[in-house]
Image (cartoon, helix red, strand yellow):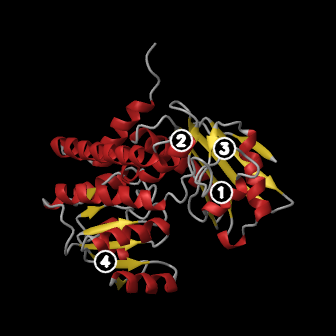
Amino acid sequence: MITRLSAPHHEELWRVTDDASGLRGYIALHSTRLGPAAGGLRMRAYDSDEAGIADVLNLSRGMSFKNAAADLPLGGGKAVIMGDPSTKTPAMLRAMGRAIETLQGRYWTAEDMGMSPADMAEIARETRYVAGLDSGPFASGDPSPVTAQGVFNALKIGLKQRYGRDDLSGTTVAVQGLGHVGWHLCRLLHEAGARLILADTDAAKLAQSCADFNATAADVTRIHATEAEVFAPCAIGGTLNATTIPELRAGLIAGAANNQLATPEDADRLAARGILYLPDYVANGGGIINVAAEILRIETRAPWVAARLDALGTTMTRILAHAAAQDASPAHLADTIIGERLLPRAG
């Protein structure tokens, strides 16, 4: 069953349920101004339906800005399944696929937190509108390495702006979250000579990653307060807030998480402390670029993705330069610059 709900600042919001499989989730389309809404499907054990709705609305809005920042002909959408990812079943995924198919191409889904390319393949049994597949003529596979590459590129740009250098050798980076993207970011940072401090809720994953990257472990609830030049939030959103910002000891924030700022005012809190924040939807746009190549059926994938990543880096450089010149928060400036791309054209 798919039921439309009210969402004043979004084009569409749907509740999806399937009694037979136990599916309960939501699909949000924030904007199709630039093209069909695209954004991943995540599965989390939300505290309530209200929390799931708030997340899917925030994430879908973020996807509108992320796709616009990457100059893609795609709008912003997102989907969530309520529940622990360890409880998902093929029947549940296929039911979500049927729900996506009913939207007739207005929303394209792909892999996100709690999902894998194999899960996308299961969903693809019921809908044409899924990307992030491992096989097929335009299959893009796991977008995590490309997302990590984009964050890595942005981090170097931010390092140059904040510290006057882009050489990561000896730079201490505190990474919060060792999921697919976080792990690949750690790999790139380690190869570039950075010193890593890592935190994750999975103790075994944390221990293995520390061994892989000769890193130091930190408490996941205190990683933000670690002495480091760079803090990289790569887990859930909202970790930069009125409580954590006063405790930050890094001068640069550059991570892969979506919606890192709990509120718009947190951008001002960071600026007041002289902490340079890289707008998350610009820094982490590599994944959707990778997925877009599949949606748009790009035959020359590798050079197309590389060119888009370079352009995304140019956009980040532009935002930081304008923010510095205007003594403004990069977050607010990014919203202004990218938001203009989402406005209807006159006439």
**Nearest to N terminus: mark 3 or mark 4:** 3
**Nearest to N terminus: mark 2 or mark 4:** 2
Which label lies toward us, 1 or 4? Answer: 1
Which label lies toward us, 3 or 4? Answer: 3
Q: Determine contact: label 2, label 4, CB under 8 Å.
A: no
Q: Amino acid at mark 4?
A: Leu
Q: Position of residue 315 (x, y in %)?
A: 30, 42
Residue 76's disc is: 2
Q: Position of residue 8 (x, y in %)?
A: 60, 36
**Label 3: how many residues lie within 10 Å, few (<14), some (14-19) or many (20+)?**
many
Q: Residue furthest top?
A: 347
In the picture of the structure, the residue carrying the numbered disc 1 is: 120
Identified at 31% across, 54% down, the residue is: 278
Q: Amino acid at mark 2?
A: Gly
**Label 2: how many residues lie within 10 Å, few (<14), some (14-19) or many (20+)?**
many
In the picture of the structure, the residue carrying the numbered disc 3 is: 129
Q: Amino acid at mark 3?
A: Tyr
Q: CA distance from mark 1 to mark 4?
A: 32 Å
**Label 4: how many residues lie within 10 Å, few (<14), some (14-19) or many (20+)?**
many
> Number of numbered discs present?
4
For mark 1, give the secondary structure: helix
**Nearest to N terminus: mark 2 or mark 1:** 2
Q: CA distance from mark 2 to mark 4?
A: 33 Å
Q: Determine contact: label 3, label 2, CB under 8 Å.
A: no
Horizontally, is 269 left or right of 344 in the view?
A: left
Q: Position of residue 112 (x, y in %)?
A: 56, 59
Quarter where residue 31 is shown: top right
Front-most of residues 286 and 279? 286
Q: Amino acid at mark 1?
A: Met
Horizontally, is 106 left or right of 235 in the view?
A: right
Which label lies toward us, 2 or 1? Answer: 1
In the picture of the structure, the residue carrying the numbered disc 4 is: 196
